[in-house]
Image (cartoon, rainbow, N blue to C red):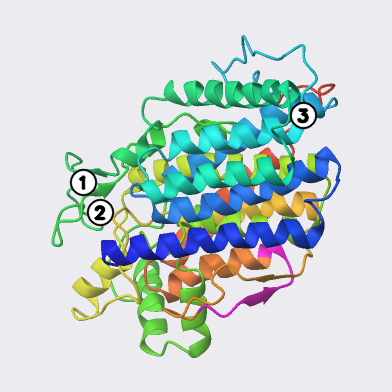
């Protein structure tokens, strides 16, 4: 999409978002006297809605980078809110090197909405400092919107609270900086120095289209909760170009489905595409969109809301690292390269092929991880109509209804087969990895009386 069109779309989308937030506050009575917990819940939802616009339109926010950002933002919010959550503990012991020290208002009574709003504004501005000026203006406007709606600027009590929220956010940002590979990952997506293994069936980064590798070192990024050795990946099936072999059969499935792509399959493929830079959300952002919709529909209490955002975001952050480590460990070529070489030289996928190896599927990893966490909180048998792309007219965006989170995750994975960018084995391994990581994070004890997993 041309730069100017993207810029105009962002301005319109961000302004619409703020209008909707204003209407949301008025329609629910949040601008009238309400509990601090209700206000804080609204603030969590509003900032996570804005994050989707920011990650979609800011250069450099590719899937792993976005996943990491969501995790640090959610961590900031959770740690800021701890004074209002007396039964919960900090994650300092789970995150080596992370320390909350010298906070300015530890002995003060804090206003939760004020501290949380200031926290989000500070950490979001940090992560999106390279965004366009219009985007940075939306961050400032949303912070002021909540200050006005909830009267968070009346006296020193609120000033103390804001200082506390900003201080926690800054310490989380400083902790992010100690991860030298992941921090500022949005500034260097493509590695021109990366040399793909030269072998049959290996993904090639530079030829024939001069596409450089996307974040080949992301597997070395610091994990949050689940270290790499805790979830060993399983290798793909042996590569073969022999007709009738298991590998050839996997490629033939992708090719065959594409030859008679049904209306339903095209809808599925485009509904879950979410990997077109500057045009759709990232696959990680798509699942935050789903989390937002669940929060809107279910209306859980504030503590549950905060824990849902924390655990789904941590799951995204960790599963991205595991997934990218496996991708560049196995370096499996994409169906497009295999099919054009072995089956049909003129074949093309429905959308462009991503600039990184195939195995395992990132979509499947992200979806399974978040779906597993959501099922832990709300039960797997949860009916939801996903409206993420509602009213988009550039592709088939009609909302789809689901009866469980696992159904959503499976269809999300399937979409990559019918879209022509993944083999079935990529998706199955992605689902397996995502489910394991999602489960490990879902059961992470957050109560202060329990022992950490690490």
**What is the C-alpha distance between the residues marked 2 and 1?**
8 Å
| Foreground pick, 405 / 454 | 405
Question: Against 201, is 383 above or below?
Answer: below
Marking on residue 196: 1
Nearer-N-terminus badge (3/1):
3
Q: Verify whether residue 399 appears in magenta.
A: yes
The quarter of the picture where residue 84 lies is top right
Marks 3 and 2, the one that precedes in the sequence: 3
Nearer to the camera, 424 or 192? 192
Q: Is residue 276 left or right of residue 106?
A: left
Q: What is the number of the mark on residue 202?
A: 2
Residue 350 x/y as whole percent: 35, 77
Percent across and percent down for residue 398 are 57, 80
Is mark 2 in CB contact (under 8 Å) with mark 1?
yes
Magenta span of residues: 397-406
**Residue at 58%, 70% in the rendered image:** 411
Mark 3 and mark 2: span between their CA atoms? 55 Å
Please name which of the two marks, 3 or 1, marks the residue nearer to the observer. 3
Q: Residue at x 78, y 49 (%)?
A: 377
Q: Residues within 10 Å of mark 1 (few under 14, many from 20)?
A: some
Measuring from the top left, give residue 47's x and y in whole percent: 60, 47
Q: Quadrant of the N terminus?
A: bottom left
Instruction: Report which residue position mark 3 lands on.
Output: 111
Q: Position of residue 122 (x, y in %)?
A: 53, 32
| 211 to the left or right of 31 | left
Answer whether labels 3 and 2 touch (C-beta < 8 Å): no
Could you say whether the residue bearing mark 2 is in a helix, strand or loop? loop
Residue 188 shown in magenta: no
Above or below, comparing residue 263 to residue 443 in the picture: below
How crowded is the residue under tag 3: few (<14 C-alpha within 10 Å), some, or many (20+)?
many
Q: Going 22% across and 74% down the picture, which residue do you hit?
A: 340
């Amino acid at each position: 999409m041309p730069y100017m069109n993207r810029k105009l779309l962002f301005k319109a989308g961000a302004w619409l978002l703020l209008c909707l937030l204003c209407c949301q506050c008025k329609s629910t009575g949040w601008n009238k006297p309400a509990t601090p917990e209700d206000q804080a819940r609204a603030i969590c939802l509003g900032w996570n809605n804005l994050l989707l616009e920011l990650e979609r339109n800011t250069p450099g926010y590719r899937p792993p980078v976005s996943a990491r950002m969501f995790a640090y933002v959610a961590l900031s919010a959770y740690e800021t809110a701890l004074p209002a959550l007396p039964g919960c503990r900090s994650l300092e012991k789970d995150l080596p090197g992370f320390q909350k020290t010298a906070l300015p208002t530890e002995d003060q009574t804090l206003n939760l909405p004020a501290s949380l709003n200031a926290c989000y504004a500070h950490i979001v501005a940090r992560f999106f400092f390279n965004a366009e000026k219009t985007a940075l203006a939306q961050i400032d406007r949303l912070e002021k919107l909540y200050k006005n709606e909830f009267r968070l600027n009346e006296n020193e009590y609120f000033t103390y609270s804001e200082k506390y929220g900003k201080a926690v956010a800054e310490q989380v940002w400083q902790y992010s900086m100690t991860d030298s590979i992941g921090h500022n990952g949005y500034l260097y997506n493509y590695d021109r120095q990366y040399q793909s293994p030269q072998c049959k069936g290996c993904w090639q980064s530079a030829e024939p289209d001069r596409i450089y590798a996307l974040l080949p070192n992301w597997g070395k990024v610091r994990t949050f909760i689940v270290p790499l050795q805790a979830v060993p990946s399983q290798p793909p099936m042996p590569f073969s170009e022999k007709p009738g072999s298991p590998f050839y059969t996997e490629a033939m499935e992708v090719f065959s489905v594409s030859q008679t792509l049904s209306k339903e399959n095209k809808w599925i493929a485009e509904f879950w595409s979410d990997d077109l830079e500057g045009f759709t959300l990232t696959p990680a952002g798509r699942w935050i969109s789903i989390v937002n919709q669940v929060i809107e529909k279910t209306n859980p209490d504030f503590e549950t809301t905060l824990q849902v955002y924390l655990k789904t975001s941590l799951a995204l952050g960790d599963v991205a690292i595991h997934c990218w480590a496996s991708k560049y460990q196995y370096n499996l070529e994409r169906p497009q390269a295999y099919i054009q070489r072995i089956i049909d030289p003129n074949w093309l996928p429905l959308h462009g092929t991503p600039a990184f190896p195939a195995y395992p599927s990132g979509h499947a990893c992200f979806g399974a991880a978040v779906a597993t966490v959501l099922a832990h909180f709300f039960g797997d048998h949860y009916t939801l109509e996903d409206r993420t792309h509602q009213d988009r007219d550039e592709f088939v965006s009609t909302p789809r209804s689901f009866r469980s989170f696992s159904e959503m995750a499976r269809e999300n994975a399937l979409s990559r087969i019918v879209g022509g960018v993944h083999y079935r084995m990529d998706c199955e391994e992605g689902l397996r990895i995502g489910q394991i990581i999602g489960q490990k994070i879902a059961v992470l004890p957050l109560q202060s009386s329990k022992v950490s997993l690490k």
